[in-house]
Image (cartoon, grey):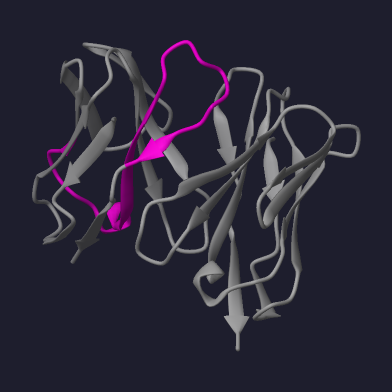
Amino acid sequence: GQNIDQPTEMTATEGAIVQINCTYQTSGFNGLFWYQQHAGEAPTFLSYNVLDGLEEKGRFSSFLSRSKGYSYLLLKELQMKDSASYLCAVMDSNYQLIWGAGTKLIIKP
Amino acid sequence: SQTIHQWPATLVQPVGSPLSLECTVEGTSNPNLYWYRQAAGRGLQLLFYSVGIGQISSEVPQNLSASRPQDRQFILSSKKLLLSDSGFYLCAWGVAGEDTGELFFGEGSRLTVL
């Protein structure tokens, strides 16, 4: 079966750095996505990785290792508004997105 | 610019009642359209997707149905709701033929079945 694993919840301090991990087992791979979802709202796109390595976009970076079935989302200089759930999703061989359950990130002052 | 809108935002329905959620997209043509359900503590579950008018693919057998009467309109329906249908329903669109997979989501509809 297809599976996306990410921690249920993480806590970090304002101004710090946090890394959210995601491991996956899917039938084929056509890219990995990270979305941000604030409580009660729709997810919004953060990043897309299809090749190994690090993609940096401002305070957010996303890393992919296809051989390890592993990705992480790195958030720097945390702000209170970063409190949200972060969803990892993998596009399989049929170009369908398989979603993780999301990691709820709590930022404390 | 492209926009997506779904409604209603919140609804409370009794078991056995019908359901209709609507979604419209503006500013793009021939989008791929999706209906997802998000249950607490679980990943987004793809319910239906459509690549064109009248073309609906169902991912999960259930008492829900979807229709695409117009290019930019996607409707999720049920004749008789079950308690297990409660959840947060999200409509989304993506660019047809583009395999980067970026989806743009509507605001969501929270359904509570009592």
* The residue positioned farthest toward the left in the image shown: B17
Q: Position of residue B69 (x, y in %)?
A: 13, 17
Q: State the residue in front, B107 or A102.
A: B107
- Pick the quarter of the image with the N terminus of chain A: top right
How many marks the image carries: the answer is: 0
Q: State the residue in front, B108 or A63.
A: A63
- Pick the quarter of the image with the C terminus of chain A: bottom right
Chain part drawn in magenta: B76-105
Residue A91 appears in which quarter of the rendering? top right
Give above or below for B25 relative to A81: above
- Residue B46 part of the magenta segment: no
Residue B35 in the figure: left or right of residue B76:
right
Residue A101 seen in this snapshot: no
Q: State the residue in front, B65 or A89.
A: A89
Give above or below for A9 relative to B47: below
| Residue lying at 28% horizontally and 30% vertically, measured from the top left | B1
Residue A107 appears in which quarter of the rendering? bottom right
Q: Position of residue A23 (x, y in %)?
A: 78, 47
Residue B12 in the figure: left or right of residue B46:
left
* The residue positioned farthest toward the front in the image shown: A58
Q: Position of residue B51 (x, y in %)?
A: 35, 14
- Residue B82 part of the magenta segment: yes
Residue A106 in the figure: left or right of residue B82:
right
| Residue lying at 58% horizontally and 73% vertically, measured from the top left | A79
| Residue lying at 29% horizontally and 30% vertically, measured from the top left | B2
* The residue positioned farthest toward the bottom in the image shown: A109
Residue A51 appears in which quarter of the rendering? top right
Give above or below for B31 relative to A52: above
| Residue lying at 65% horizontally and 52% vertically, measured from the top left | A58
Residue B30 seen in this snapshot: yes
